[in-house]
Image: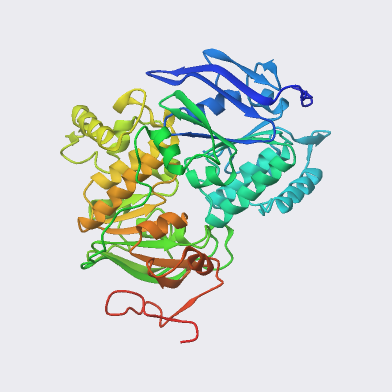
Amino acid sequence: MGEKVSLSQDSEYVVEMLNITKVFPGIIANDDITIRLKKGEILALLGENGAGKSTLMSVLFGLYQPEKGVIKVRGKEAKINGPLDANALGIGMVHQHFKLVDNFTVLQNIVLGLETTQKGVLKMDEARKKVMELSERYNLMIDPDAKIEDITVGQQQRVEILKMLYRDNEILIFDEPTAVLTPQEIGELMDIMRNLISEGKSILFITHKLNEIKEVADRCAVLRRGKYIGTIDVASTTKEEMSEMMVGRKVELKVDKKDADPGKTILKVENLRVAAGIRGHKKDVVNNVSFEVRAGEIVCIAGIDGNGQSELVSAISGIGPMNGGEIYINGENMTKHSIRYKNTHGLSHIPEDRHKYGLVLDYTLAYNTVLQQYFEPQFSKAGFLNEGSINKYADELIDNYDIRSGEGAQTIARSMSGGNQQKIIVARENTRPHDVLLAVQPTRGLDVGAIEYINKEIVKERDAGKAILLVSLELEEVMNLSDRILVMYEGSIVAELDPKQITVQELGLYMSGSKKQEVIGVGEFAPTGKLAVRKDGE
């Protein structure tokens, strides 16, 4: 395609998706759906995991071709055979699962497909200048020369947004753009979206987060199980009404839990250190961190993304390096043991990156449910897998966790929606035997109905005597679920807080480094098992 198509101003709607039907094996993902986006508005697209939201937007972006239906752009029928056609029509998309090349730099990823060459040589000077101007203008600061594989998930999200802005798109699709962002970054993104609208752009915004819809969206179209339910005016509709439209029943938006009754120490971390060099850090990523998590409590590591919490959990689980310190589970020193040994001796782990560490995407749903147990007698004998037993186990998890898929236990994980992929991991890690659960953003990408369910499961785990170490970037989740909060800033624990005694604003100050507590001696613990701390000025 050549230059961008000049879009006429005749129609009230910049995009009309009329009677769209998209079918995959075993499932009708979009069943005769009609939605319309007005010029200069933010239209939210709300629905449960697997409701068909991302599929519908992928049809608009040309990644899928519908079996039926018509797409109109500015009142004119458009045939969108791929992303290049979409870009030519001024349509851009920020994907839920990033479309980035890991071993390319940030700058190379942003210009990919729009490269400027002179006599066969790549010319990047103008591109670099434009990218830096955009990153400053929209407060999306990023190192253009960093490789994607060396930057955090939150930074990768910024690259996706910059990719779209670099292409001067007028119709912007945001597919779960805040799933990996910190509260501060989410606030900045909301501002960016408002600025884009004020510049005459139009936005389709897929999200599960009702607060975000209330904050920025003008209208909200609701999908349920592939069908269109209706479009509402956001300002005059409550969050409770929206969640009921989405799920088809009333949803508890607050976590109902009794006070914790902690028992013995299950997880103990002493002077854990992860050295510089990871993801381009110049000083220690984790700096002599010590804490304990006891049976029957939820301890949350809170912090802005990139302050060492991801590396801390990777070191505890064994999927990442550690350069010093010791880890104990049930009093046994696990520091030098393998990942499998930890997994079979009390540790469960819901990882931050579900694609990289949580699933084998080309395996079936069934195989993914037994990744850490396939070698046990229940699932194999004499080196041969017991397919019947594995499928039966998977069917139980599908029923218990409402995992939605086209072909049940035989569905390939890669073909499933992000939220349902996450449910596989949560179901697997909660169900297999364990004493401590490392839960890193366990509700990332889930709808309110699934979040309600997962939160109840985590509290149920706590009440059954499990030790829960939660890592979350969601302030609401931190405050709702935690019994204790440990704040990480620049690789160190700078505060231990009681969620009942602080505000969200105060927590934000600790997370940003504006406020600190002083730890008395590295790894020194009070008799209760808490870090001994004193507040500034005491």
Tell me, yes or no, if residue 212 can be seen here.
Answer: yes
Query: In the image, what residue occupies the spot 30% across and 40% down?
Result: 371
Looking at the picture, does residue 512 appear above or below residue 90? below
Q: On the image, which quarter does residue 477 sit in? A: bottom left
Q: On the image, which quarter does residue 197 sit in? A: top right
Tell which residue pokes out farthest to the bottom in this image.
Answer: 538
Tell which residue pokes out farthest to the right in this image.
Answer: 119
Q: Is residue 161 left or right of residue 386?
A: right
Query: In the image, what residue occupies the spot 35% across and 56% down?
Result: 317
Looking at the picture, does residue 61 appear above or below residue 71? below
What's the image's color scheme?
rainbow
Residue 295, horizontal then vertical, whole percent:
23, 63
Q: On the image, which quarter does residue 130 sit in? A: top right
Number of numbered discs? 0
Looking at the picture, does residue 58 appear above or below residue 440? above
Q: Is residue 351 left or right of residue 158?
A: left
Q: In what quadrant of the picture does the N terminus appear? A: top right
Residue 121, horizontal then vertical, whole percent:
79, 37
Query: In the image, what residue occupies the spot 31% across and 80% down?
Result: 526
Query: In the image, what residue occupies the spot 30% across and 51% down?
Result: 458
Residue 220, horizontal then vertical, whole percent:
54, 34
Tell which residue pokes out farthest to the front in this image.
Answer: 236
Tell me, yes or no, if residue 341 can be seen here.
Answer: no
Between 51 and 157, which is closer to the camera in this rendering?
51
Residue 168, horizontal then vertical, whole percent:
74, 36
Between 154 and 337, which is closer to the camera in this rendering?
154
Q: Is residue 127 left or right of residue 433?
A: right
Between 334 and 249, which is closer to the camera in this rendering?
249
